[in-house]
Image: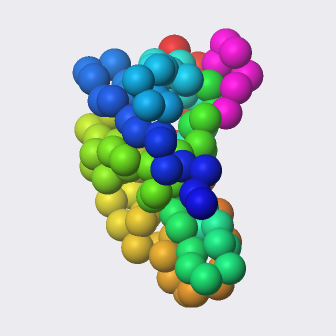
């Protein structure tokens, strides 16, 4: 049984909420993101792409994987919310197989607000 079975994302103009069934369990506001890292996780029989959002001022990290409903919408929204993200990042993380391929997609510079 997948631990992400009941997770979903709800996107809005300022970011997204991670929900479990009908309850919000985490919130990511684009303005609070200090780093976005993508990587591939080995699930024994298959791999899954994950995106980790490091958030300030809470120093929390929120990770979503391809198994989370709404992952594709969040993945597609990244280019609009963070224009410096390289467009082909997803393909780079996918290859080669069986490698983590951790990639920093976005890192806020100290002088950014």
Left or right placement of residue 19 versus residue 3 in this view: left
Which residue is depicted at the point 67% across and 13% down? 57
The part of the chain drawn in magenta is: 56-61
Q: Which x, y percent locates residue 54? A: 63, 33
Q: Is residue 7 visible?
A: yes
Report the predominant secondary structure element of the magenta stretch: loop
Looking at the rendered structure, the number of numbered marks drawn on it comes to: 0
Depicted 70 relative to depicted 54: above or below: below
Depicted 24 relative to depicted 83: above or below: above
Q: Nearer the viewer, residue 45 or 106?
A: 45
Furthest residue to the front?
1
Furthest residue to the right?
59
Q: Is residue 9 magenta?
A: no
Task: Give the quadrant of the N terminus.
Answer: bottom right
Which residue is depicted at the point 33% across and 59% down? 87
Which residue is depicted at the point 54% across and 67% down? 48
Q: Which x, y percent locates residue 110? A: 64, 24
Residue 108 sits in quarter = top right
Q: Which x, y percent locates residue 40? A: 60, 67
Left or right placement of residue 80 versus residue 47 in this view: left
Q: Is residue 38 visible?
A: no
Which residue is depicted at the point 67% across and 33% down? 61
Q: Which x, y percent locates residue 14? A: 34, 19
Left or right placement of residue 35 versus residue 95 in this view: right
Depicted 21 relative to depicted 104: above or below: above
């Amino acid at each position: 049984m997948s631990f992400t079975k009941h997770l979903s994302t709800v996107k809005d103009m300022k970011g997204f909420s991670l929900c479990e069934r009908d309850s919000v369990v985490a919130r990511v506001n684009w303005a609070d993101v200090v780093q976005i890292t993508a990587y591939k996780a080995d699930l024994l029989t298959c791999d899954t792409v994950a995106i980790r959002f490091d958030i300030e001022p809470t120093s929390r990290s929120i990770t979503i994987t391809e198994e989370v409903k709404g992952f594709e919408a969040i993945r597609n929204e990244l280019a609009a919310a963070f224009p410096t993200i390289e467009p082909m990042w997803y393909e780079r993380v996918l290859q080669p197989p069986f490698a983590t391929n951790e990639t920093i997609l976005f890192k806020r510079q100290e002088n950014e607000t």
